[in-house]
Image: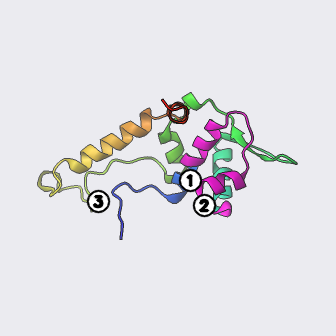
Amino acid sequence: MSGSILKISEAASIGLHAMMILAQNGDKLVSVKEIATTLEVSANHLSKVMQRLNKAGFIESIKGFNSGFRLCVLPDKVTFLELYEIFDGKLKSSNCLLSHNDCKSNCIFGDLIISINQQVREKFETTKLSDFVKSTSEYNNGK
């Protein structure tokens, strides 16, 4: 059994990863099938995720013979936080895993929960699509 401290919905995770793929492809149209194959996810679930990203104005859908999706925003203007919040709502900081408001001073985790929440928020606020594209292209070029 594996567990994770950080809880992100599958839709948000797929959305973040799909946006990275689109950012890496620039103006090239990328099909749902290509993205689903790359991410090893259901094309049906991915289609629903892509509809939400399209409705939110981050991507555009091109229909027809060479149909697909592409970004309609600049990768350096989109943060992980914006994308996360499309799927999982506003990122809220909680000081307690049990959602208690009164155990701050006696919490068995001390300030660990507060610290982790702050780190996640800072990471999501400061990470942009362009950051990932740069690091991926540098990695792929052997840098």
Q: Where is residue 81? Give x, y as percent.
A: 47, 41
> Magenta part of the protein: which range?
16-44
Q: Compare residues 28 and 111 and report the one nearer the observer.
A: 28
As helix, strand or loop, the secondary structure at mark 2 comes to loop
As helix, strand or loop, the secondary structure at mark 1 comes to helix
Q: Earlier in the sequence, mark 1 or mark 2?
A: 1
Residue that protrudes farthest toward the bottom in the picture: 1
Q: Nearer the viewer, mark 1 or mark 2?
A: 2
Looking at the picture, which amino acid does disc 1 mark?
Answer: Ile
**Location of residue 44 by image quarter:** bottom right
Q: Residues within 10 Å of mark 2 (few under 14, many from 20)?
A: some
As helix, strand or loop, the secondary structure at mark 3 comes to loop
Quick check: marks 1 and 2 in contact, CB under 8 Å?
yes
Residue that protrudes farthest toward the right in the picture: 65
Q: Mark 2 points at which residue?
A: 41
Magenta-drawn stretch contains 1: no
Quick check: marks 3 and 1 in contact, CB under 8 Å?
no
Q: Which of marks 3 and 2 is in front?
A: 2
Q: Residues within 10 Å of mark 3 (few under 14, many from 20)?
A: few
Give me the C-alpha separation between circle 3 and circle 1: 27 Å
Residue beneath the point at 27% across and 59% down: 97
Q: Compare residues 25 and 49 and report the one nearer the observer.
A: 25
Q: Name the residue under label 1.
A: 14
Q: Which mark is residue 99?
A: 3
Q: Where is residue 121? Give x, y as percent.
A: 37, 41
Residue beneath the point at 49% across and 50% down: 89
In this rendering, the answer to whether 143 lies above or below 45 is: above
Q: Where is residue 107? Give x, y as percent.
A: 15, 56
Looking at the picture, which amino acid does disc 2 mark?
Answer: Val
Residue beneath the point at 37% across and 36% down: 122
Prevailing SS of the magenta stretch? helix
Quarter of the figure that contains the N terminus:
bottom left
